[in-house]
Every structure is written in structure tokens, then in C-alpha cells.
Amino acid sequence: KWSQIMQKIIHDPRYQALKTVKERKRILEEYQEEMRIKESEERLQREKMSRKGYDELLESSDWLTEKTKWLEFRDKVEDDERFKAVESDRDRRDFFYDYIDDLAEKARERRKQNRKENMEKLRLHLTSEDCKWMTVDTTWRDAKDNKIDECPGAKELDKSDVIRVFDDIIKDLREEERERKAREKEQRKKLERKLRDAFREMLNEKILLGSFHSKSDWEDARETFAEDPRFTEFAALKKAKITPEDVFEDFATDIDDRIHSPKKQVKSAVKSTFGAVSADAKIEELEKAIENRDEIKDLDAEDVKISLFEILAKAKYKQVEREKKRKRYLKDLDKDFRKYLARGYADNMKELREASLEDAVKKCSSKMSSSSAYTKLEKEKVQEIFLSIRDELTGKKTGKTMDVEEKGDEKKKKRKRDSEDEDDESEGSVDDEDDTGKKKKKKKKEKESKKKKKKRRKRDDSNSEDD
């Protein structure tokens, strides 16, 4: 304090150098402040040097570990000057534990780094060519059977870390497998779409050439493009969601819907020009004949051409059906004549030799005269068949008639023939109107079925494109 210091320096001549007490106090305070700063700096320097020496002591004690206790360390180094340089025992202990914490942190980091390196070493080994047994389907039991715990890096790791590496690899393999399948699926979709579009383009080309029409069956149409690469490549695609037949049915339905209205106008123009179209008519002649008709002037040229092909195809179809029906009538009439004539004249074949067609029909059965085969065929053809069967049965050409034994055989078979008559009555003959009605119903049913299938396929196709 000022009072204490003043008593000690008041007699010093230098005390009198300053004239006022206030000035003397100010100089004292400045001196005291300087000394405090100097002492603080010296103390900090000493503490710094003592801490440095203490740290060197700790670092030179290579026997220290993160588990070393304070008392053990103190007992071993308490005589060391570097230990004594730190005056506070608390500071010594704090410095010691700071160092131990650093050692523990470094040990943890070292273990962590070693674990990371060993796990990476194990991963590299398991994904190398040396471990071909490691696949997406490998189980932990399989890995143990292949001695995964003896692989590089595995011995230095805990079992849980080895399992973690194994699980991570399997997870990556499964993800790669999913990505690969997704890529293949997408590529397959693109390829299928490309082949499907090419096939549909081919169908459009073929229908404009008249190779088939919208009412054609798949089997018949396929013969017209069976060798075309655009069909063979599409047909060779395995497990395709949409088959060539599906595309054809959709295309045929689209064409049928597309030309539904234009075909009526083309039919009107053809009917006005030709009346009925013959099966041997040429498409070029039909086109040229109706090209200036008012009914088709606003129609698309392709629609007109496709409609003409369909009209011509229908004419050919009707001709074929008429020929089939005529052949069936001829066959049925031949069968009826043989059956009824042989039965009606079984007892007197000589009478049949002189009988006319009308007499034979009256004598045999009214069923024969009311059958479709008898009524639909030309009278000349009926007469020709009758004469041929009559001559055959009476033996005019060979000069022989049916003998007694043959007549006996005929009588023995009477019951069987009577049962056949009953079957004939139940079956009857199917006339033209019945055939036409059944075919119309069948076509209508097939058309509805095709439309349902087409809607379903379009919905599936749109879903696959969205995916």
C-alpha cells in the first residue's frame, strides 16, 4: 500500500524529485502494474517450461498405456526433476490424465483404421476371382464351408465384422442383379416394341397387296408372310408378352373398324358399276372402273383399296362355299339314291331297271325328294346320278343283277336300315339359311372375343410402356 511504501522511501532523496503526492502515487501504481505483468509473464514462462518438461517425461515413458493409473505413474517418476517442475499436484494429475486420454483416443483411431483396412482387405478378397463361390445366392453357411474366417483380413476382425462384410457384399450383388434384370427387361421391352412395330408395318404392306384381309384367319394369313424376316424375328422372340397372332388380331380388328364405313360406300360404287362381283375379277379393273364415282371421291385411297380386296375376297369365299356345298349335295344325293333304291327295290331289281326317276322317288321315300341335295341340284345332274346308280344296282353295264343271296343279305340288314332311317329323320339336311345363320353367329362371337382380347392387350401394353 502507499502508506507502507511511503514510510520506507520518504527519506530517500529521490522521493523529493516529484513535487506532489498525487504524482508520486501515480508513478507507484504504474510501477506496480509493470511488475505484476512481468511476474505474470515469468510465471507463465515457468509453467510453460515445466509443462513442456512434464510432457517430455510422459512421452519418454513408453511403458504408459491408456490403462495406466495415476498413482502408478507418480510412484515411478516422483524423483524426476521434470515431475517436480510442476509445482501443483493437481496440475500434475490433470496433465497426466490429458495425456492418457490422448493415448486412448489414438488407440481407438488406430484400432478403427486397422479394422477398416482389414474389412476392405476381406471385401477385396471375397469379390476377387479367388472366391467364385461368392454369388448372389450364397448363404452364411456356404461362406463358412468355404472357410471365410481364414480369408485375408478375417482373422484380425471380430465375427460380427466378418458377417457385416459378407452381408454388404451379398446386398451389393443383389442390387446389381436387380439392376441387371431391370436393364434386360427394359431392353427386351424396347426390342419387343421394335419388332412388334416392324411386324405391324409389314401387315400394313401385305394388306395393301391383298395378301389377306381383315376377316382372314391367322393360319391362312400367316402363310402369306411366313418367310418375311419381320415375322420370323418377332415369332422367334421367346416369352413375348404379345405374340404375332395377337398383333395380327389387333391389326385385323383395327382395319375392320377403320373401313367399316368406307366399305359401304365402295360396295355401293361397285354395285352401281358391276352389279355382283365375280370371283375372278381383277383388283386393277375394279379400281379403274370406280375411280371417278362420287361415292368414293372423299375416301382415302388405301381405304378404297383395302375395301375392294375385301369385296373380292368375299366373292371368292362365296364361290368356294358354293363349290363345297355342291360337292356335299352330290355326295349326299349319291348316298340317298344308293340307300333308298337298294331298299325300295330289294325284292324286284328288274322293276328298277325300267323305272324312271319320278317313279323311283315315289316308290322309295318322300324324304329323298324333300332333301336339300335333291331340291338344290340341277335336274339334269340329279337325273345323271340316278341313272348311274340305277345301272350300277341293276347291273346293266355288267349284265348281272342282284342274286337271291344278295337279296337275303339285304333283308337281314333291314332292321339296321330302319334304325338308320330314324337317325336320318332326326338329323335331316341343313339348308342354306341355317348354314348362313350359324356362320353369322360364329363370326359375331369371334369378333366380340377379338375386341375383348385387343382391349386387354392394349391395356397391358400401355402399362408396360409406363413401367
Image: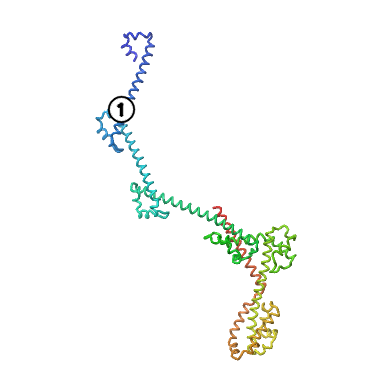
The color scheme shown is rainbow
Q: Where is residue 459 in the image (x, y as percent from the top left)?
A: 58, 56
Taking the view exactly as shown, the residue that stands out farthest to the bottom is 404
Q: Which amino acid does label 1 sit on?
A: Ser
> Which quadrant would residue 142 be assigned to in this image?
bottom left
Neighbours of disc 1 within 10 Å: few (<14), some (14-19), many (20+): some
Q: Which of 102 and 295 is in front in this view?
A: 295
Q: Mark 1 points at which residue?
A: 50
- Count the marks: 1
Say if residue 164 shows up in the picture. no
211 with respect to 265 (left or right):
left
Q: Where is residue 277 in the image (x, y as percent from the top left)?
A: 71, 67
> Which quadrant would residue 424 be assigned to in this image?
bottom right
In the picture, which quadrant includes the N terminus? top left
Q: Nearer the viewer, residue 438 or 37?
A: 37
Q: Is mark 1 on a helix, strand or loop?
A: helix
Say if residue 388 shows up in the picture. yes
Q: Which residue is drawn at 32% across and 13% down?
A: 5
State whether residue 367 is above or below residue 456. Answer: below
245 with respect to 274 (left or right):
left
Q: Which of 435 and 293 is in front in this view?
A: 293
State whether residue 374 is above or below residue 132. Answer: below
Q: Residue at x 75, y 60 (%)?
A: 292
